Amino acid sequence: AQKVTQAQTEISVVEKEDVTLDCVYETRDTTYYLFWYKQPPSGELVFLIRRNSFDEQNEISGRYSWNFQKSTSSFNFTITASQVVDSAVYFCALSSSNDYKLSFGAGTTVTVRA
Amino acid sequence: EAGVTQSPTHLIKTRGQQATLRCSPISGHTSVYWYQQALGLGLQFLLWYDEGEERNRGNFPPRFSGRQFPNYSSELNVNALELEDSALYLCASSLLPNSPLHFGNGTRLTVT
């Protein structure tokens, strides 16, 4: 069985602060994929990043960065110098090469105050 | 490129009725997924269709069903509606299994 845990329910920061979202996953599969999605107040889920289980290289995209560590089964997401537009619910998700079903964490609501 | 489109945007039904939700994937995408996002329950996987066939199903009762048409569009049917079926139903499509999912704006179903 696959499981994704996002322990942080809500995070509130002031603009320009950094915010790190934790994601811990469980799977018995050796080949799997990890994702992050953003759901702004408008409701549409927006894809941010995908990582496969064989690629532990960290990634930076503008103000976003991701830290994948297989040793701790974690795939954390950091927003640097947060902006009000970053306010959204962020979901971490996991799928495997066996069933392709995307399992989502409960989500973390990020509120960035001006 | 047009994104995933879902209709209707909102749907209000009474308990016991049937609801039909529709989804058109991104052109070229053959896989369609349905998710339920109910308050306090997060995103729950419902169904996955690929090339017209149901490939996987989440932990939902049989009154949740659907199909995928030859043009890869899909519909989700919910029979004998219950109050707890009230939720946002999200459709997504992907080019290949395990490719990133592209989501529509959802259908907000309210059961009274």
Image: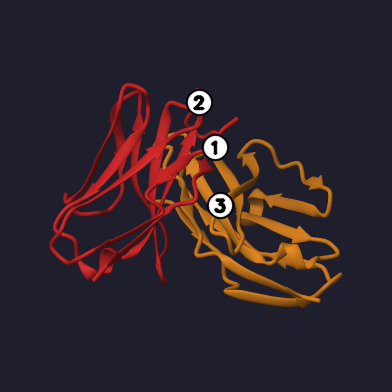
Do tags 1 and 2 sit on the same chain? Answer: yes
Assign a secondary structure to mark 2. Answer: loop
Q: In which quarter of the image is residue B57?
A: top left
Chain A on-screen colour: orange
Q: Quote the CA–CA distance across marks 1 and 2.
A: 8 Å
Q: Foreground residue, A3 or B72? A: B72
**Residue, disc 1:** B3
Tell me the residue at 70%/78% (across/down): A12
Q: Which of marks 1 and 2 is nearer the N terminus?
A: 1
Indicate the amino acid at tag 2: Ser
Horizontal side of residue A102 vs A50, given as left or right: left
Residue annotated with mark 3: A45
Question: Looking at the picture, do discs 2 and 3 lie on one chain?
Answer: no
User: What is the distance, in whole Å, between disc 1 and disc 3 at their CAs?
Assistant: 12 Å
Residue occupied by mark 2: B27
Q: In this view, does B73 lie to the left or right of A82?
A: left
Q: Colour of chain B?
A: red
Residue B107, percent from left and from top: 39, 54
Q: Tell me which residue sits at (28%, 28%) in the image.
A: B53
User: How many labels, in total?
Assistant: 3
